[in-house]
Amino acid sequence: MPIAWRRLSYIVVACSTGAVGAGCGSVEASDASACGPTRVLIDRVVDGDTAYTSDGESLRYLLIDAPEIAHRADESSDCYAVEASRANAALCEGHELRLEYDPECRDRYGRLLAYLWDEDLLINEVLVAQGNARFMVIPPNDRYATELLRAEAHAREAGIGLWGQC
């Protein structure tokens, strides 16, 4: 098993047991790319694949699709939506993370599209590996498609997260 996958497996276990915290530490000061900031503080998680930065920027995680949370009283949340949102919050909320972009920087809603990194850990991949989100590619943004597809296959086969509940 490659070192990166062992570390991801460790994080999946740590996250599923609630032992998250130390791995989502601080990073250096912010700078910018052509798309937007490369380092952000995650202020508030919206659901399993969306968050707001401390600057009020809406951030949508690339290559993943988490179950939707109901935002109105007349709606109901998708299966595993609350769990996915909590997992996202545990990994990201209140933490400074590095952002990496693909060719398309924003979606049709104006949200910033990015991969989120905590040091060498790809948060998008962790959420999929934990069964908190499904792999979803919207071309041309596909840089880590192979890694996330592999993580989803593992979670699905093992019945992890939404794959065992929904």
Image: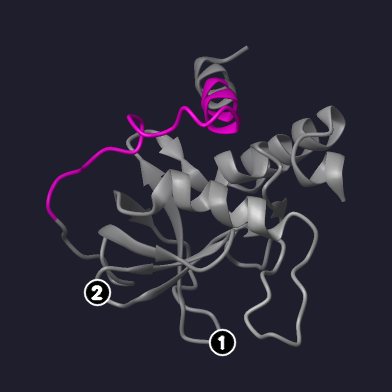
Q: Quadrant of residue 130?
A: top right
Tell me what residue is drawn at x 52 percent, y 25 percent.
Answer: 14
Q: Is residue 107 above or below residue 80?
A: below
Residue 87 position, x and y percent, is 55, 47
Q: Is residue 162 above or below residue 68?
A: above
Q: How many marks?
A: 2
Q: Quadrant of residue 128?
A: top right
Q: Is residue 68 above or below residue 23?
A: below
Between circles 2 and 1, the one closer to the viewer is: 2
Residue 96 in the figure: left or right of residue 136: left
Residue 154 in the figure: left or right of residue 31: right
Q: Residue at label 2?
A: 55
Tell me what residue is drawn at x 65 percent, y 50 percent.
Answer: 83
Query: In this view of the protein, can residue 95 be seen by the observer?
Result: yes
Q: First in sequence: mark 2 or mark 1?
A: 2
Relative depth, front residue between 54 and 28: 54
- Of all residues shown, which one is farthest toward the front? 73
Mark 2 surroundings: few (<14), some (14-19) or many (≥20) residues within 10 A: few
Tell me what residue is drawn at x 58 percent, y 57 percent.
Answer: 85
Residue 29 position, x and y percent, is 12, 52
Mark 1 surroundings: few (<14), some (14-19) or many (≥20) residues within 10 A: few
Q: Which mark is residue 108?
A: 1
Q: Main secondary structure of the magenta part?
A: loop
Residue 119 in the figure: left or right of residue 124: left
Q: Secondary structure at mark 2?
A: loop
- Of all residues shown, which one is farthest toward the top? 1
Q: Amino acid at mark 1?
A: Arg
Q: Amino acid at mark 2?
A: Asp
Gap between marks 2 and 1, in whole Å? 20 Å
Relative depth, front residue between 10 and 81: 81
Q: Which residues are magenta?
A: 10-29
Q: Which mark is residue 83?
A: none
